[in-house]
Amino acid sequence: MPQGTTWDKNTKTWGAEDGTRVDVSVYDGRIEIFVRIDVRQADAELVEGVASLADYCNAVFLSAEGDIIAPSQPALAQAIAHSAAAQFVLDPELYITELRDKPKPM
């Protein structure tokens, strides 16, 4: 992915601002990696590479919903397939209808 620009001097970014993107940040000697996979154009090779890197680093994934995902290609692929983004891409009208009809938390 092509390297992008960011305002944060501690962060390097690759990919598209509105698509698949990887950010690597270093704060106080701690490395944080943010990965966003555009489900409209999911790339199996990228998913495999990201999962392999996480496994190598003894890391896990944290979904946007806060779920912990194992560092494996099957677990990551399943999480992507069941994500809100994937549900929206599959059927935007149904997703919005279900979101609208979902009971509101008190």
Image: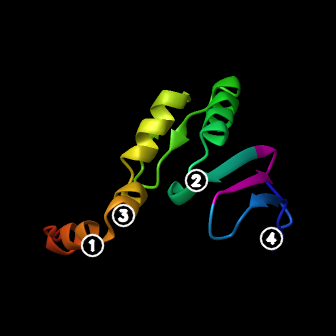
Q: Are marks 4 and 3 in contact (CB under 8 Å)?
A: no
Q: Position of residue 23 (x, y in %)?
A: 73, 56
Q: Residue at left 13%, top 68%?
A: 103
- What's the CA distance linking mark 2 and mark 3? 14 Å
Where is mark 3, residue-wise? 88
Judge whether residue 28 is colored magenta: yes
Nearer to the camera, 52 or 104: 52
The dot on residue 6 is 4
Where is mark 2, residue-wise? 37
Q: Position of residue 88 (x, y in %)?
A: 36, 64
- Whichever of callouts 2 and 1 sits on the residue coming sooner in the sequence is 2
- What's the CA distance linking mark 1 and mark 4? 34 Å
On the rendered structure, is 75 left or right of 25? left
Q: Which residues are magenta?
A: 20-30
Where is mark 1, residue-wise? 93
On the rendered structure, is 73 left or right of 34? left
Principal SS element in the magenta part?
strand
Between tags 2 and 1, which lies in front? 1
- What's the CA distance linking mark 2 and mark 1? 22 Å
Q: Are marks 2 and 1 in contact (CB under 8 Å)?
A: no
- Look at the numbered disc 3 and give the secondary structure of its residue: helix
